[in-house]
Image (spheres, rainbow, N blue to C red):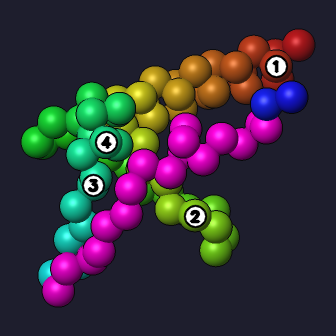
């Protein structure tokens, strides 16, 4: 049975924060997410959990879809 958490799917490298707070996103992650210079990202964290980077346009689409879903559920 294959484990549900495969480190190869999730651990894409490491990085170090510079003096000005800048972090370089590892190339493997940039390639996987099709990120290019100027790509806008949303930075999220729930409580003290891990930090999450999401493409801004994908987050916008997700939030819009959730808004529509919540409205359809409340209208029933």
Mark 4 element type: helix
Q: Give the alpha-carbon distance from disc 1 to disc 4, as whole Å.
A: 39 Å
Q: Is residue 47 above or below residue 75?
A: below
- Residue 68 pos. (x, y %): 63, 19
- First to last magenta residue range: 3-19
Determine the residue positioned at 46% across, 24% down. 61
Q: Which circle, 3 or 2, is nearer the viewer?
A: 3
Which residue appears at 50% of the width and 51% of the height? Answer: 11
Q: Earlier in the sequence, mark 1 or mark 3?
A: 3
Q: Earlier in the sequence, mark 2 or mark 4?
A: 4
What residue does disc 1 label? 73
Q: To which residue does mark 2 refer?
A: 50
Q: Residues within 10 Å of mark 3 (few under 14, many from 20)?
A: some
Looking at the rendered structure, which numbered label has been put on residue 28? 4
Position in image of residue 2 (x %, y %): 79, 30
x%, y% of residue 64?
Answer: 52, 25
Is residue 40 visible in the rendered structure shown here? no
Q: Main secondary structure of the magenta part?
A: loop
């Amino acid at each position: 049975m294959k484990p549900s958490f495969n480190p190869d799917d999730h651990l894409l490298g490491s990085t170090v924060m510079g003096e000005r707070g800048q972090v370089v996103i590892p190339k493997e992650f940039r390639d996987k997410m099709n990120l290019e210079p100027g790509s806008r990202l949303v930075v999220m964290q729930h409580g003290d959990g891990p930090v999450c980077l999401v493409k801004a346009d994908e987050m916008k689409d997700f939030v819009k879809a959730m808004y529509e879903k919540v409205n359809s559920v409340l209208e029933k």
